[in-house]
Amino acid sequence: MKIFNRHDRIIPADQDTVGGVLDSLSGPEDALWAREVWPPMVLKPELKVGATGGHGPVKYRVSEYVPGRRAAFQFEKSGLLAGVDGRHYFEVVPRRGHVIIRHVLEGDCGLDTWLKWALVVRPLHNTVIEDAFDKVESRFSGKAARRSGHGPWVRFLRWVIARQRRRPE
């Protein structure tokens, strides 16, 4: 089964400036990932081709990196998306007077993994990416982040995950 998920946000800035935000990904001054409200993206040793890591239970390796333009990640065969043969990437796309920051997740999987994606991962993923884009947009627009909204299902899933983490082994 196919998975395809795309998020775009118009950012009122130039490509080099927003590209710097992309380049900060997983670093100590990460200006893209919403690590204030989600598990941080961690890459070892740093954002470069071959680096491994992920965020929370999602594991991947950097398969492509064009500084300031694009960072692509291949899913590993372990972690929450172990059953997905695919990738996700961020890119900064220039337009007249602004840029589009984009995130795409695409892959192939079996029915069991697709159901996990549809019911659990996709709602969390959508919120993570929109929170990240809120962070970037507020940085360049001068307005407070609009907080894309953690609906009841996402709040419930986060509650379940938090309870599982607190449970003694």
Image (tube, helix red, strand yellow):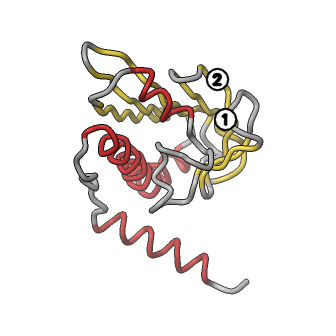
| x and y, in percent, of residue 165 in the image | 61, 76
Front label number (1 vs 2): 1
Q: Residues within 10 Å of mark 1 (few under 14, many from 20)?
A: many
Residue 64 got which mark?
Answer: 2
For the residues labelled 1 and 2, the Cα–Cα distance comes to 10 Å
Nearer the observer, 161 or 18: 18
Q: Residues within 10 Å of mark 2 (few under 14, many from 20)?
A: some
**Image position of 64 with respect to 169: above or below:** above
Query: Element type at marker 1?
Result: loop
Residue type at mark 1? Leu
In the orientation shown, which residue stands out farthest toward the top? Answer: 96
| x and y, in percent, of residue 141 in the image | 25, 39
| x and y, in percent, of residue 30 in the image | 54, 46
Image point 53% across, 80% down: which residue?
163
**Image position of 166 with respect to 59: above or below:** below
The total of numbered circles placed on residues is 2
| x and y, in percent, of residue 49 in the image | 72, 27
Nearer the observer, 92 or 79: 92
Q: To which quarter of the image does residue 5 belong? A: top left
Nearer the observer, 91 or 161: 91
In the orientation shown, which residue stands out farthest toward the bottom? Answer: 168
Q: To which quarter of the image does residue 124 belong? A: bottom left
Image point 33% across, 65% down: which residue?
153
- The mark nearer the N terminus, 1 or 2, is 1
Q: Is residue 153 left or right of residue 72?
A: left
Residue type at mark 2? Glu
Image point 33% across, 23% down: which residue?
99
Give the residue pinned by disc 1. 47
Q: Is residue 65 left or right of residue 135?
A: right
Locate the C terminus and report the quarter of the image it occupies.
bottom right
Query: Element type at marker 2?
Result: strand
Q: Is residue 114 left or right of residue 45?
A: left
